[in-house]
Amino acid sequence: MTVVAKYGSGLVRTQVVADEDGWFTWVRTAGPDRAGSLEVPPPAVRDALRPLETRPDGHGDAVRCVLPRLQDDALHYPRLPGRSSLARRLTLPNAPAPTAPSHTPAVPDTADTADGTEELLYGLGHLLRRLHATPLPAAPADGRTPPPMVRRLRAWVASPADGPAERLHRRVRSLLGTPRWHGIEAWLDDLAPGEPLALVHGAPSLGRLVPAERPGSAHALVTGEDVGYAPAQWDVGWVVAELREMRFFSARLGRPGAYWEGLAHSFLRGYGPTSGALVGRAAALRVLLHLLDFSVLVTWDDAEVRRVAALIVQLVDEEGSAR
């Protein structure tokens, strides 16, 4: 086995190992700024997710969940089909595209989408729809807790720690204005009033989506450490938020805004009907969480804070107009 990549943040570190049989194992450990270690899902949740480890049928590139095993305080995600996440391939120059689909694409290629990424995003949407349709595992009502990412954002909004977290809290609250800030507080208390809880991935980031390097293999979504219970729109909004951020900063990434819009459209087509307003709420919260992590764990950049806050304002205001 050979280590082919290492990267990470203050929250989590990832080491990618090339296995002798052509597959890859991702080994994830807690970063120095994380309170506590990464955890595997409880047995009942793991059993509920296990059917999603198989390759689905239907349109769109097949995407399956890959669940972790705990070994030496690290989460090992075995038999992954690639060494790089889709996020790294989209944001790093000269990164390889996903393998070409072996079937007729559900999303026709155009000059800007012939890299196969739209088809992959369609498959991600289809997988998340399957996940959200999974019957809830047996658990006491108070055991159905939100994903860790929701809990972390709630804690920061309610009572930020001293230092950069508190500085960002004051700055963002000022930039958003009191009405929008109160809206965010309300969404964190109840993202989607009246909506049923679903078993959710919790953080279906493009950084967890692994395009297949092996022809004929299903793509993979690293799944487990952030699983929780929330309205399904939490996961959908997470993906939409990442693509919206990339569109917002499209000049930096060397792709036109239409490229990112096409990816978002394909993802939503793969997922199917959902509430645009509720997805918008979740997207705004995801962008806010990304800003929190960047400002506290990476660096303080006031110009960047203002730019990202402007995007959050757009998302919050769009949610209001969509109701």
Image (tube, helix red, strand yellow):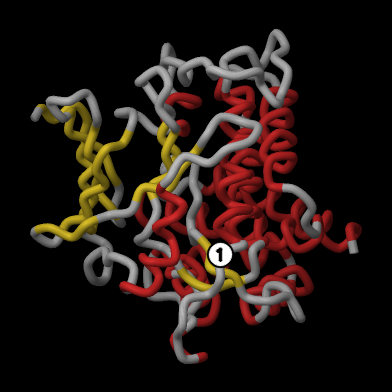
**Residue at the spot 68% in from the left edge and 40% down from the top edge:** 270
Which is more toward the observer, 116 or 32? 116
Which is more toward the observer, 123 or 172? 123
Asked if residue 2 lies left or right of residue 314, the reply is left
Asked if residue 225 lies left or right of residue 271, the reply is left
Q: Residue furthest front?
A: 57
- The C terminus is located in which quarter? bottom right
User: Does residue 31 appear in this view?
Assistant: no
> Dot 1, how many residues are within 10 Å of its Cα: few (below 14), some (14-19), or many (20+)?
some
- 75 versus 120 height, above or below: below
Determine the image quadrant of residue 182.
bottom right
- 243 versus 28 height, above or below: above
User: Does residue 270 appear in this view?
Assistant: yes
Determine the image quadrant of residue 217.
top left
On the image, the x and y values in percent for residue 8 come to 28, 44
**Residue at the spot 20% in from the left edge and 46% down from the top edge:** 27
On the image, the x and y values in percent for residue 5 come to 22, 30
On the image, the x and y values in percent for residue 162 come to 38, 74
On the image, the x and y values in percent for residue 77 come to 26, 47
Asked if residue 252 lies left or right of residue 309, the reply is left
- 102 versus 36 height, above or below: above
Q: Residue furthest top?
A: 111
Where does label 1 land, which residue? Answer: 134
**Residue at the spot 56% in from the left edge and 71% down from the top edge:** 135
Disc 1 is placed on an element classified as: loop
- The N terminus is located in which quarter? top left
**Residue at the spot 15% in from the left edge and 30% down from the top edge:** 19
Residue type pointed to by label 1: Thr
Determine the image quadrant of residue 23.
top left
